[in-house]
Image: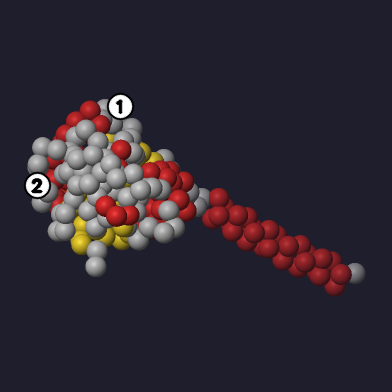
Amino acid sequence: MKLKKIASLMLAGIMAVSMLTACGTSTADDTQKPDQSEEPVVADVVSAVEKGIKAHNSDLEINVTTSQNMDAAIEEVFGTLTDFKISETVLVTTLRAVFGMKDFGSDYDLGYKNSNFIDHPESLEWMNNQQTGAVYKDGDSTWVYAYIPVHNNAFDTQAGEAIGYALRGLENVIPSAADDDIGSLNYENLNVDYTMYVTAQDATMSNNSVVTYVVAVLKADYSARV
């Protein structure tokens, strides 16, 4: 009887230790901190934009990349201005300075009227020489830009999709006059090489909320077709 009693006491002790150990493990798990919000990752933006463009314009050849100078400049602009959209001219002036654009005072450069290709699709018609007056020659280049607010860093479904849809009509070849069925525009016989620089930066609004913006700058370089 004594042996049975001793065995029972030992078993009870083992079970108690096991329960305490289990409780300790549970407590450690419960005190784990939730994942903290992450800063925008520019590499994720590049991937999202490439995916969005491919979904809407699979034939378009375009180099989507980053620019350290652009990253730093936009981060500074967004860090010093609140509600930056009120001062879009500051954004445009910053992009001109980063990429050394010339201010021709027209839509050939990063102008003010039709430059935001998300809001103004006709800016891409200019790049494709599809509007009267937008005649580019060998060696010319032009620029357009866009800025898109994103939430929860959902670059793929927001910025990538918006940019891809906006570029759905962009082409790498501008037809010559002989290729033009209408004959109404003075087409040049050109190839177009596109480079898009993208960044994602946080902007603090006047109400202290933080909004992540994707800024995209699209450059078109024109060269004679041979």
Q: Nearer the viewer, mark 2 or mark 1?
A: 2
Q: CA distance from mark 2 to mark 1?
A: 36 Å
Q: Which residue is mark 2?
A: 102
Q: Position of residue 147 (x, y in %)?
A: 30, 41
User: Residue visible at 14% across and 58% down?
Assistant: 139
**Front-most of residues 5 and 161:** 161
**Mark 1 residue element:** loop
Answer yes or no: is residue 65 visible.
no
- Badge 2 density bin: few <14, some 14–19, many ≥20, Cα 10 Å: few
Q: How many marks?
A: 2
Name above or below for residue 92 compared with residue 197: above
Placement of the C terminus among the 4 image quadrants: bottom left
Q: Which mark is residue 142?
A: none
Please report whichever mark, 2 or 1, sits nearer to the chain's N-terminal start.
2
Q: Position of residue 86 (x, y in %)?
A: 23, 28
Name above or below for residue 107 compared with residue 167: above
- Badge 1 density bin: few <14, some 14–19, many ≥20, Cα 10 Å: few
Name above or below for residue 175 compared with residue 211: below
Q: Which mark is residue 207?
A: 1
Identify the amino acid type marked 2: Lys
Placement of the N terminus among the 4 image quadrants: bottom right
Q: Residue furthest bottom?
A: 3
User: Residue visible at 39% across and 41% down?
Assistant: 150
Q: Position of residue 75 (x, y in %)?
A: 22, 46
Residue 2: name its quadrant. bottom right
**Mark 2 residue element:** loop
- In the shown orientation, is residue 33 left or right of residue 138? right
User: Residue visible at 60% across and 54% down?
Assistant: 26
